[in-house]
Amino acid sequence: MRKGVLILPLIVVSLAGCDPVTTDSGSSDTSGLGALLNIEVVSGLKEEYVQYEIVDQNEVMVLAEYENGFENVGGDQLTFDPGILDTSEIGNFDISISLLDKTVEWSYEVFENTGIEGIEIPDSVKNYNNNIKEQSEGNKRKEFMDRGQGYFVGDDNPFVFVPVIFTYIDDEELFVYGYHSVSTIDEKRGDEWVRLAAEGEISEVVAIDEYASSYDFTEAAIGKSYRLTVRPAGEQYALGDQFVVSFEFTVCEGFNVFDQDDLSHFDNVNSLWTNYRTEKGWEVQDIDGLILHNDIKVKASNIPTGFFYSEGDSEVSSGDADYDRVIGSLRDNVNLYHRDIAPGEDFVFNGNYFTINYSTLPYVVRESGRIDALPGSVISHATLIKAGYNRTDADLGDYTMKNLRIIGNANRTEEGEKSGGAIFTKLLSVDSHLYNLIGTQCFTFILTELAGPNPIIEKTRGYDSFSSMLYNWGTSNLQIIDSEFIGAGGPIIIADHVSPEADGSGGNPSGTYFINTKLESIVTGGENWFKLVHADAAVTDIVNLGEDVIAQYGTNSITKLININGTDVAHFNLIGVVKNGAASEPSSEKIRGVISIDDGVDLDLNGPFITNPGLVENFPPAMPRFQSSNGEMALTEGTILLNPLGQPIPKYSETQTNYFTGPYLNMYVSVGTAPTDFTAGYMGLVFGLQER
Amino acid sequence: MKKSVILIISTLSLVAIILIGLLFQRAEVYNETIYVQKVVCTSIRIGDDYYDTFWNERSQRYLVENPEEPEKEAPLLFIDQLTIDVIYEIQPMDASTQTVTFSTNSDVSIASIEEATGRIVFYKPGIATFTITANDNNNESAKLKIRTKTLDG
């Protein structure tokens, strides 16, 4: 049953207008209608507006009279002088509306808004409050691990705080974009809030524009917490809780970002952004930090076109096999927002618990310029945000990114084109601390490059990536603390030895150290990543090892059968892969590298398990070696396990005891070269040991 | 029909069945997450009565629609402890996470909403905005504004 007594009657304000006589297209095509004789406003404009009322000039409609008929023409076809129907000031005003050579004048009055029925905190603040909430047990993956950092406001540019204002005139809602505000500022001193005096005290910490609702904090306010309370100006709004809102925050160094255009000021590397800002008439902002005040949906239209392939591009020809896909696609190896942080500088990227969503960013179609006839062969290197520039300085700048949710454009999926998804962030030569992030659907979430970043990833969650969730490109000291990574399309982490010497030394070996971090990537080997890196051929061997060899030695193994639609399918929990950085698939070159998980025995391709003369003598090359996180060792000849002395290990059926214990199993692949080279491995893998 | 033709057709059919089976099996070896792209507030319910809502672009909110005038907001008559249920839908319909959480940042002396069920109670006349947030990491949400008045308000 609908309608009923609970709906109150409305007084409808109707706008006068004439019925259209002929066409209502708004089209500029007036062929056949003859010369334009006259225009008359029929809708979309009023004679009275409240101050700050939103006027959509596209909704203006004029009736155009021609020699041979009439036509309704919409606001997008009209010219306004002044260009904007301004309602920011009270008074009487005129605006001219023109179509071709005909003009009509429109007079309107702006009066004070006395129809405010209530105000609420801005929607962005509502979103912030929701984002820091504790989630129920089933929704913990969307909960920030640290919800108590608070809200920050930067001092580089004004903070705009416009409440949602509910205005009703004659019982009809009018929408306003601003209001004349009255503000009070309280400063936190110890445990108390102290009201700042309107004269003197306030001006030392903030410049308030009561019409623009902007609050420009000074350096004197940095590090201090404030409570801002606002209400509409006017005695009628001085009483009543429905007219008052308050918000608490701390002031810090940095630039306040309200939309994607503001985010562009992060980049100080790429000339494409310099040109972009110049074309738009934006001042260069010399910022030393960045704070989000809203969710940012990254759109390609707000990014310089030089980052994408376009029609007329010298590298694109209509005869290219990928021509139907490459136009508009993202170039590989680009860093869309890149900041160089010099030694001595300290830059904080504070998400304020908001979201950067780049789910609609176009994919990479050409990996390093290569043309593929079909999608799904690309391994993308394009990155949304990069911090650090290639430096050899001993001292590095400091970079922190915190309190941010990220939604990428490449989840774990069968869709091959998502192999061209973008990496969220790369860290190079800057001391990096990523704290309290949540990343989903990124091609790869975080990538560290070489020796520079000294990176720490802390209290961070990652889920559902197309490729590995983390990538260590030759960084020897990547620390990941109190975090959670689940559901990569391949391993949780790929860790490369970049440019090793022939004997596996030199270059930039990787070192990854997990502390108190949940790691889980349950895969079958059929995921797109395996095909992409040609690892699918190795899946059969992994499954055989798990199901037929290791399974004989315990109730646990590296594989586990999970029933999918009536069929048992072997799954394995692939935590990490250590490999040669020059290879995107298994290779035969020696490397080093370490994956360490809590207090368990490390996967160390140059560790005692590999190099101890007492052990290697008994471990012939070209035989996979295993060592559990509790230290049990074994190798295999393909069907059974052997101990370090080369003797068959008793099976579970004889001992009723698991041979391998601990949460993980390290596997060293194709160790050394027969017949005498026992040292340095080709590849290392870390599996989660699963109860079957 | 010749036996050889029947045999060929049967064999091809069997192969097709096996391949299709393998295809579907492979497609299901992991559950691809389908994220919520949109939360839509379709209507509200007061007792047994349903009232449509409509999306207002300027306010970025769903509003209760006047059944006599489409795309016009209608205030609700306030009665003590006015109870309203929010009716919503998730898009796409096969999103992996179907649950939402309800919240409000409005003056709680005016109205409250139960986090799990979306049941609203108005304690006094006024305006309140309620947020419906999907529980997956896309964090999509929709806002619903309800205005209540007394007869002489």
Image: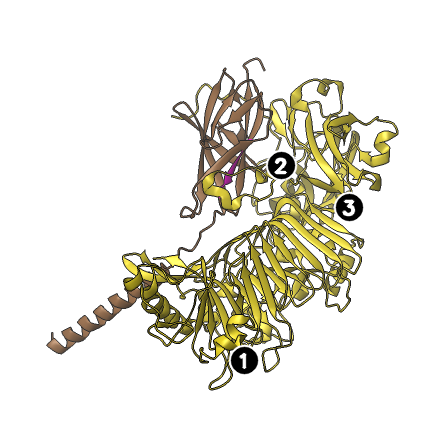
Chain colours: A yellow, B brown
Question: B47 or A607, which is in the foreground?
Answer: A607
Report the span colored magenta: B130-135
**B104, above or below A283, in the image:** above
Which comes before the other along the chain, label 2 or label 1? Answer: 2
Q: Secondary structure at mark 2?
A: helix
Give residue A570's position: percent from left, percent from top: 35, 63
- In the displayed structure image, the side of residue A321 where residue A645 appears, left or right: left
Q: Quadrant of residue A352?
A: top right
| Front position among marks 3 and 1 | 1
Check residue A123 in the rendering and tell me which mark sits there, or answer none: 2
Which comes before the other along the chain, label 3 or label 2? Answer: 2
Give residue B25's position: percent from left, percent from top: 32, 61
The amino acid beneath tag 3 is Glu
**B70, above or below A8, in the image:** below
State the residue position of label 1.
Answer: A589
Q: Quadrant of residue A180?
A: top right
Q: Whole-Å distance between the Cαs marked 3 and 2? A: 24 Å
Position of the C terminus of chain A, as image quadrant, is bottom left
Q: Secondary structure at mark 1?
A: loop
For label 2, the crowd category at 10 Å Cα-Cα, with few meaning under 14, some 14 to 19 and many 20 or more, is some
Which comes before the other along the chain, label 3 or label 1? Answer: 3
Farthest residue, direction right: A200
Give residue A35's position: percent from left, percent from top: 67, 50
State the residue position of label 3.
Answer: A253
